[in-house]
């Protein structure tokens, strides 16, 4: 059995003495789409930030191996250069930075047009536009995904990639996720939308900072629907109650 | 000439004025444009008039500067864009060696009814600082007239910059003032721009972008007052502060008519953390990310 691309053991992150990630274990293989389900506040976005090494998200305990390398001592840009990236749930806006620049960050020779077409945006209309407030939320999300596609990461963490995208365009998002896999990458797919989660190879459910179920996407969706907790603060949850 | 090809000085279809200190080195006019500049010991004094209905196809280049470490340059100019005329002015202000010099501009601009002026002013300074740059202007925008100004100081260390613009806008007139400044070392920037929306359905926008590093200081005041029905104004100031620099932004908005509206936004601080982290997740180093964010803001 080859080692997983991402191998997380006992990962713990606390904020204000409250465990947001609680001894979390998770493994993602090469070219795997892994959906992560969980209620609001269960720790999904925190896990993304901890993995990416965002400021103020240093874990208190645990290990994370990425492609065989110990990820946690590394700085954020070192992790990115290793092939890990994050598409943000609410992507930042950049005054003055063009879509062309944004899609070729760190790779000025890269052709941004294929990625832009892949997310359904016409290059002649968008490449010279700025990644600023003039873009709609949906346009900004697509450009975020195009930026990830351009980067050709080993593992893309997609935090709610379909948020703000109209219903008719969900299939487009699904195609993009599959394109990341087809290009040789893996995806950690954080989502609330069942139809998006169901395209995954495997899925896990996060509750109060712990993985409480892993299996097929259908099983995970059923499990998520049937969960006994109504709040994932550990108080009402059968899975995490001591 | 900075920011333009030197060959434009030979192009008979392009008007220009080139002055060093209080000496005019070269000038040319084109049909529809009258330029009367006079050398005096204390100042360059003159008028620039675009005749009624004239459309000056090519930008009018004005190149001012000092080629020595010390010296003074004072310019007193009346700009009149007569009814229905259109012109663009590119002003290049060049002080590459200045260490203890002064550049003072006193301008009166009158944009006639239905006329349009786009005024772009670029400053280019050396590394020494120590200059005093004092551009002061009063601009009157007539009925249905348009005025767009774009001031930039992105190269070198200026020393002290003190901008003071007052703009009066009549019915359906438009005034858009943009300033982009990168301050270094001990530069001290004072920028005061005031737009008085006197006329009905007049429009005003003050947009300021300042990046400070070292021990630079900036005090930015954007004032918009709306006096008439349907007048709309907005003041938008963003300052990024790095190192030991410090900044203030004072938006002052006043409305004197129930059907007028003026809004403002101001942001001062370090580079936005989320913008920074987003770029880093794409593989840029923190330094590269800051550079891109700053250069984007100053475009």
Image: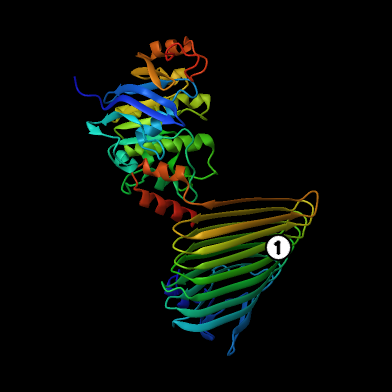
The answer to whether residue B205 of the structure is visible from this angle is no
Q: In the figure, B233 relative to B25: above or below?
A: above
Residue reaching furthest bottom? B41
Mark 1 crowdedness (10 Å alpha carbons): few <14, some 14-19, many ≥20: many
The answer to whether residue A142 of the structure is visible from this angle is yes
Which quarter of the picture shows residue B134?
A: bottom right
**Badge 1: chain ID:** B
**Quadrant of the snapshot with the N terminus of chain A:** top left
Count of marks overlaid on the render: 1
- Judge left or right: residue A176 versus residue B113: left
Which quarter of the picture shows residue B294?
A: bottom left
Which residue is tagged 1? B114
- Judge left or right: residue B239 versus residue B224: left
Residue reaching furthest left? A1
**Quadrant of the snapshot with the C terminus of chain A:** top left
Q: In the figure, B171 relative to A127: above or below?
A: below
- Judge left or right: residue B234 versus residue B198: left
Q: In the figure, B107 relative to A142: above or below?
A: below
Task: State the image coordinates of residue B139 (x, y, percent, origin top left).
Answer: 68, 68
- Judge left or right: residue A34 versus residue B229: left
Task: State the image coordinates of residue A201 (x, y, percent, origin top left).
Answer: 33, 18
Q: Residue at x 32, y 21 (%)?
A: A25
Q: In the figure, B239 relative to A39: above or below?
A: below
Q: Nearer the viewer, residue A224 or A11?
A: A11
Task: State the image coordinates of residue A43 (x, y, percent, origin top left).
Answer: 44, 25
Task: Give the colour scheme shown.
Answer: rainbow
Task: State the image coordinates of residue B59 (x, y, percent, origin top left).
Answer: 54, 69
Q: Nearer the viewer, residue A98 or B241?
A: B241
Q: Residue at x 53, y 55 (%)?
A: B239
Q: Please, what secondary structure does the residue beneath circle 1 have?
A: loop
């Amino acid at each position: 059995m080859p080692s997983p691309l991402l191998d997380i053991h006992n990962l713990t992150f606390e904020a204000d003495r409250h465990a947001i990630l609680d001894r979390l274990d998770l493994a993602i293989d090469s070219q795997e789409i892994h959906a992560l389900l969980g209620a609001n506040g269960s720790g999904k976005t925190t896990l993304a930030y901890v993995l990416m090494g965002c400021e103020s998200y240093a874990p208190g305990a645990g290990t994370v191996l990425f492609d065989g390398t110990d990820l946690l001592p590394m700085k954020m840009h070192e992790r990115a250069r290793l092939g890990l990236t994050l598409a943000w749930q609410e992507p930042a806006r950049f005054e003055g930075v063009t879509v062309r620049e944004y899609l070729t960050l760190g790779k000025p020779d890269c052709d941004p047009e294929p990625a832009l077409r892949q997310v359904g945006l016409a290059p002649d209309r968008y490449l010279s536009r700025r990644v600023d407030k003039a873009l709609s939320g949906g346009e900004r999300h697509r450009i975020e995904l195009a930026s990830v596609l351009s980067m050709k990461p080993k593992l893309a963490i997609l935090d709610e990639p379909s948020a703000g995208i109209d219903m008719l365009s969900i299939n487009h998002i699904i195609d993009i996720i599959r394109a990341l896999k087809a290009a040789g990458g893996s995806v950690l797919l954080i989502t609330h939308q069942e139809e998006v989660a169901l395209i995954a190879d495997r899925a896990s459910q996060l509750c109060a900072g712990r993985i409480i179920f892993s299996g097929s996407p259908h099983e995970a969706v059923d499990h998520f629907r049937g969960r006994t907790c109504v709040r994932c603060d550990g108080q009402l949850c059968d899975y995490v109650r001591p | 000439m900075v920011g333009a090809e030197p060959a434009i000085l030979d192009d008979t279809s392009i008007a220009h004025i080139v002055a060093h200190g209080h000496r005019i080195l070269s000038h040319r006019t084109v049909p529809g444009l009258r330029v009367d500049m006079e050398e005096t010991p204390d100042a360059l004094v003159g008028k620039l008039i675009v005749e009624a209905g004239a459309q000056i196809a090519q930008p009018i280049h004005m190149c001012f500067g000092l080629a020595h470490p010390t010296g003074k340059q004072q310019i007193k100019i009346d700009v009149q864009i007569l009814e229905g005329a259109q012109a663009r002015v590119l002003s290049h202000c060049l002080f590459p060696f200045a260490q203890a010099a002064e550049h003072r501009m006193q301008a009166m601009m009158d944009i006639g009814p239905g006329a349009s002026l786009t005024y772009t002013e670029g400053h280019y300074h050396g590394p020494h600082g120590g200059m005093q740059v004092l551009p002061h202007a009063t601009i009157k925008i007539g009925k249905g007239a348009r005025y767009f100004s774009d001031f930039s100081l992105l190269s070198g260390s200026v020393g002290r910059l003190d901008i003071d613009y007052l703009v009066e806008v009549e019915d359906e007139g438009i005034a858009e003032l943009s300033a982009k400044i990168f301050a270094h070392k001990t530069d001290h920037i004072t920028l005061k721009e005031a737009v008085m929306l006197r006329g009905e359905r007049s429009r005003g926008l003050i947009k300021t972008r300042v990046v400070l590093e070292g021990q630079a200081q900036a005090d930015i005041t954007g004032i918009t007052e709306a006096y008439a029905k349907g007048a709309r104004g907005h003041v938008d100031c963003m300052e990024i502060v790095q190192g030991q620099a410090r900044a203030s932004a004072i938006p002052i908005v006043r409305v004197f008519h129930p059907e007028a509206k003026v809004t403002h936004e101001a942001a001062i601080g370090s580079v936005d953390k989320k913008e920074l982290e987003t770029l880093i997740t794409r593989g840029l180093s923190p330094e590269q990310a800051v550079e891109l964010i700053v250069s984007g803001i100053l475009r």
